[in-house]
Image: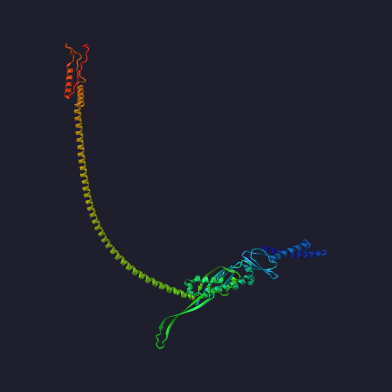
Amino acid sequence: MLLNMITTTGYLLLLGAVLMGLYSWLRKTSFENQQSGEDSMWKNLPKPFSKKVIACIFILGAIGISVDKAIFYAEAGQSYLVQYPWGTQTAVLTPGFHPRWLGETIVFKKFLTVSFGPDNNEDFSGTAPTQTIRFNDSVTADVRLTARFQLPENAEQFLPMAIAYRSQENLINSSLIPAMQESMRNAGRMFSAQEYIGGRGGDFENAVLDQIRNGIYLLDVEEDRSSHGLKQVTDEATRTIQQDQTIQVCVNIRRDMNGQEMRKDSGENPLEKFGITLAQANVQDVDPDPKFKEKLQEQRDAAAQVAIERQNARKEEERKKRIIAQGEAEKAETQIGLEKKQIEQVVAAETKAKMAKQEQLERITQAETQKREAEIERQRKEVELETAKLEAQRQLELAQAEAKARELKMKADNALEQRLAAYVEVSRVYAEAIRGNQIVPQVVVQGSEGKGGSNATDLINLLTAKAAHDLGVTISESAPPATAATK
């Protein structure tokens, strides 16, 4: 873009210098005529330009024009072959400004896209009509293919390629398109249309791409003739046998002793020789011959009809199986119902027997439990009786021992302690009986014999003495204390 502007500016400067020179010459001629007395239309125009100004502008214009011949700008994504006037060539593979010194530049895109098809895009580097191939069963097909190639990235490979082809169009038309066409045709010989339709389309596409990348296969063709259906003709006079033959073509890749594929022009493949690589390829469509498609449609219809008949037969078979299965199911259901009833009856009888047995066991267990309880109660009572006997015996023995001890004790001191206790108790009772009563009179009349006691006192003394006598206690009498009267 910048070089184009400089070149355009140079042309404009050259044109301006020429116009300025012409104007100056005309203005000078008009001035001379004016001095000779002639009237001129140039007398009112500006003065002519100086020769130095015109020369400078001319030189700048020439330099502007020559810049495009001295340097050029390499666009990104493009490679250049520069052909110098003295016969040498050089490769320019990096973008930017580069010198060319009046040399010629030949442009190559780093990536070339080649397409086969009826509606090719103008943006493709190269285009070709849809390629017609023939399968090994004589069925033709139209193939649409798009491939993207990468040119060499180093000068050692790019320079020989650019010198050999001289232009991008020549490279595409003389090598890339023919290589793609031959790859598609050779791949078509390896397969039948029926095989391609039957599921080997991927193998066909791989064969096309591999041959574009690495070279054309060498193929070996074999015919397999098989006879079948021998039938005798109805005409007995001819004695001719009708023979049906099937010819099957088998195409294989020729291989060397190591099992590697053998290829046409091995080592001289232009793409491999010049370092051109297949970056991407796509078999867009393989359109067989319309007659084959009609026959294929008939086969599909027949296959569909056969499939329908087979499906109907399968349905009838399934229906038969379903009816049989339904009968077996009903039979099994009835049998299961009867068996279920039998099982219920057996289970009920077993349950009843188990319940009766359980009740019997419970009764036996209850009886045994009652028996054990009665036995335990009897043993308990026996133990209690024995214990009571032992306790009674013990009490008896204790009472006897105590009585014996009391007896011995009483014999020892004539039961003095008991008699004293009884005497004390009797005295206490007497004291309780007379407490609160005035037994002794307030006025005591003492007799002449000196005895001044009352009858109550005498009664008490008599009772006390009687008790002591009854208890066997001897009480010593002491002289009563002297009263006030006696004194």
Q: Is residue 140 visible?
A: no
Asked whether, in this view, residue 333 is left or right of residue 43, the answer is left
- Number of numbered discs overlaid on the protein picture: 0
Q: Is residue 454 above or below residue 120?
A: above
Residue 258, horizontal then vertical, whole percent: 53, 73
Residue located farthest toward the bottom when viewing the structure as drawn: 237
Point 19% across, 37% down: residue: 393
Residue in front for this viewpoint, 451 or 144 = 451
Q: Is residue 482 left or right of residue 55?
A: left
* Quadrant occupied by the C terminus: top left
In this rendering, does residue 304 appear at all? yes
Note whether 149 is above or below 383 in the view shown: below
Residue 418: name its quadrant.
top left
In the rendered image, the residue lying farthest to the front is 412
Give the image quarter of residue 75: bottom right
Q: Relative to residue 347, is residue 91 depicted above or below?
A: below
Identity of the residue drawn at 49% across and 74% down:
193
Quarter holding residue 455:
top left
Is 435 left, or right, of 107 in this rendering?
A: left
Residue ID at (34%, 68%): 322
Tell me how the rendering is colored: rainbow
Question: Which x, y percent locates residue 449?
Answer: 16, 12
Rendered position, 183 above or below 374: below
Where residue 107 sits in the image (x, y, percent)? 64, 68
Image quarter (top left, top right, bottom left or bottom right) of the N terminus: bottom right
Residue 373 lies left or right of residue 35; in this view the side is left
Q: Nearer the viewer, residue 35 or 72?
A: 72
In the image, farthest residue toward the right: 36
Tell me residue 480's x, y (percent). Answer: 20, 16
